[in-house]
Amino acid sequence: MPSRCALLLSAVLAALPVARAAGAAGAPVRVVSMNLCADELVLRLADRDQVLAVTYLAREPRGSTVAAEAVGLPVTRGLTEEVVALRPDLVIAGAFTTRATVGMLKRVGAPVLELGVPADLDGVRAQIRQVAAALGRSERGEAMVAALDARLAAITPAARPLRALVMRPNAFTVAPGGLGDALIRAAGLVNVAAEIGRDRFGQVPLEAAALADPDLIVVDEGAPGMPSLADTLLHHPVFRALARAHWTVAIPNRFWTCPGPQVAEVVARLAAAANARAARP
């Protein structure tokens, strides 16, 4: 008896001719997104009738900037069976999308676009253009990049390079060399994580945070009525003392998560907080 894997592979192979034919004439008409960051770009750039499905995460307003746009669309959890059943002519995945599913689709020649992880604002612009071109909507990509650049140009950077420490849930910080670090620098600030020897995303002990003596502490904006164990750090006596002694700014997690036009909001809020802090005697 054929194994489940063999049967699944047969199903994929059977679906592919239909999927390829559907998009052969030009822009893809049956698009499936398998990653939240892909969801955000697809829902902003594609025609709605191009989109077959997005991830279930797209509907979560705390983490998604396109929760309203995702309402009414089918969602998946990244399973091969789900994707195959939709017979897409383009699948957009991220670097950390379910690897088994992506691997299976690529093995059989499915039309998969894998998005990387931009490390700076130029990377954000390039990824917007990449997705827009794949969707046959390059003009929308250029408009999105122009809007991003206009928003960034309107921001007044920090008057002086204050030292900022990001303390996210479970005490994770923003590593030097990544997009979050680039956003901090775009706001005219110094990323304290670089000073304490972090070169990857990692947790910051409260003792290290206190000794770093930052000018500005950046935390995630919590959702009312949604307590989380990951946020217990905010209630620790050491952190409370640190927050009282320094200027604290809360930024919604959804603005940091993905490399889309929303990253300009992070820069704007950081710069505004830094300028308000610098203005105090």
Image (spheres, grey):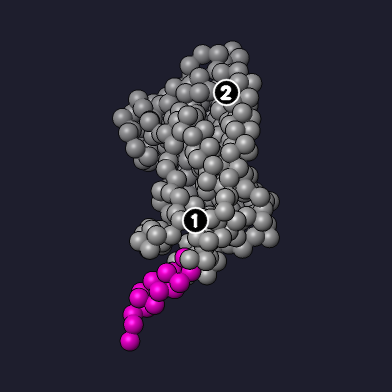
Q: Residue 271 carries which label?
A: 2
Q: Say which element carries label 1.
A: strand
Q: Is residue 184 magenta?
A: no
Q: Where's residue 173, x and y in %?
A: 42, 37
Which image quadrant: the N terminus?
A: bottom left
Packing grade of label 1 (10 A; few <14, some 14-19, many >=20) is many
Q: Which mark is residue 31?
A: none
Q: Distance between the residues labelled 1 and 2?
A: 37 Å
State the residue lying farthest toward the front. Answer: 25
Which image quadrant: the C terminus?
A: top right
- State the extent of the magenta-drawn residues as a range: 1-16
Q: Closer to the camera, 99 or 45?
A: 45
What residue is drawn where x is 56% and y is 18%?
157
Above or below for 85 versus 247: below
Residue 63 seen in the figure: no
Q: Where's residue 190, x and y in %?
A: 44, 22
Q: In which quarter of the image is residue 176?
A: top left
Q: Quadrant of residue 73?
A: bottom right
Q: Closer to the camera, 93 or 267?
A: 93
Packing grade of label 2 (10 A; few <14, some 14-19, many >=20) is many
Q: Say which element carries label 2.
A: helix
Amino acid carrying label 1: it is Val
What residue is drawn where x is 63% and y is 44%?
44
133 displayed left or right of 151? left
Residue linked to disc 1 = 91
Amino acid carrying label 2: it is Ala
